[in-house]
Image (tube, rainbow, N blue to C red):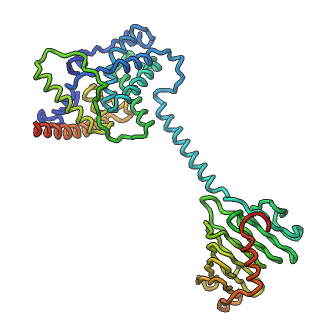
Amino acid sequence: MNQRHDQHSPEQRALDALKKMPALKAPDTTRARARQAFFIDPDTVVTEDDASVGVRGSVWTAVAAAAAVVALLIYGAMPNGHWIVTQAEPASAISIVGHTPELGQTFAGGSVQTAADCEFELTLDGIMRMRFRPDTQAEVPSTPARWFNRDRELLVEAGEVFGTTDGPLGFSFRLRTPEATADLVGTTFAVIRNAEATCFCLYEGSIEFTPLATGQAATLPVGKRVTIYRDGRPALIEPIDGGEQMKLQMIQDAGTGIAPD
Amino acid sequence: MDRSESQKTGRASFDEATLRRVRARDAAAMEHFFDHYFDRVYAHVIRVVGDPTVADDVTQEAFLRMNRFLDRIDPTRDSDGWVFTVATNAIRDHWRSRRRGMGRLEVEMGDDWNEPPARDQRSAQENLEQEQEAELIQRALGQLSPADREIILLRSYEEMGTEEIADALDITVEAVRQRHSRAVKRLGVAYQDLTSGESMSS
């Protein structure tokens, strides 16, 4: 029946010894348990099919694992907090697509336009605060997801946005204007766009800016402002002025808590 | 009494009528069936899984499954294939549940083992030699993976046919042959190493 090996080969000697292995007698307790299992009324046992139980177990394990992965993906892609409107005065002078700004309400992100006599402020609790000065037009990103899709970008088309973060951000946050970009790494900053240029101001922390015309990134020193002209003149770095310094100090003092200051 | 004397030649295959009675849950036939297979199934299980406690559980599970699916016995075929297929499935489900895959483990024959049921009339010297040989082959088996042990025990100890084993393991007949051949080679190497070591130490 079995493959025959050379009589003196290790395989054959092992097989010969195997066939001479003694019969084994199980402990009486094991016999008793098995006997009970064999003679139990099958109608009293509710179990799965023998032939399929392993397969079903594997299938359900796979389904559970897939569900866990999906749940983690969903959880990881969920927003990590919400923008909260912490200032909107007067609310009637603020244009937000599909949204009426009211204090304490969440803001999912979108276009923001403030009139000449109003300010609007959003706070991501414990992480970041942004104040949109009068006559500002911007596209505000949604808040970053927990684990995935965490890169965010604030587009400032006109006006002034002052912001502060609570230490280094745990996600990528880029300021963008038609002339330049600036990447934040935990900082108190301002982005200003007027008819002539884009200005990034750095009060504290770190910003790396890139004029789109040249594509050459540079680091902005603390306490400085960089002006990136629309007409292509070289970027100009100079100390922030008194008015900017005051506003930057104010936004930094406000912190990143959601309670209006 | 070794296995070849007590089971191989003395094993009475159930006739079709008896198996029909087992299928019909005739108490006497079931009793006969259980007595015939219990020690063989338990010995097979413990030699594959290596742990008496686990073997106890798996054997119980195997007989529970046999009970549930008695109506699936084919009275026209040897019931050995069906019994060891159920036992094999119980072992494999145990491995799956423990997520230990096919890792190696040492087979230990601890104090839970009872002595073989009876001794023949061989000399004390013969008995001693056979006990030593049995211990060595058991240790050699213990050095193999559970999968190797399983296929060797089914094919070379229980002498199941390749088709029956293929059904039990859900693999092709050719795969059975290849796996068995490779497993036997590994068993030979392990056994030779042990016997060489034994000779040197004695």
Q: Is B160 left, or right, of B59 in this rendering?
A: left
- Name the image quarter holding residue B165: top left
Residue A98 in the image, given as x and y percentages of width and height: 82, 62
Residue B121 in the image, given as x and y percentages of width and height: 14, 14
Residue B180 in the image, given as x and y percentages of width and height: 27, 36
- Name the image quarter holding residue B186: top left
Asked whether the viewer can see residue B77, the reply is: no
Above or below, A139 relative to B146: below
Q: Is A193 left, or right, of A70 in this rendering?
A: right
| Nearer the observer, A203 or A184 | A203
| Nearer the observer, A256 or A7 | A256
Residue in the picture at 60% in, 60% down: A148
- Name the image quarter holding residue B168: top left
Above or below, B67 relative to A111: above
Residue B73 in the image, given as x and y percentages of width and height: 41, 18
Residue in the picture at 34% in, 41% down: B103
Q: Is A62 left, or right, of B14 in this rendering?
A: right
Above or below, A100 relative to A22: below
Above or below, A223 relative to A168: below
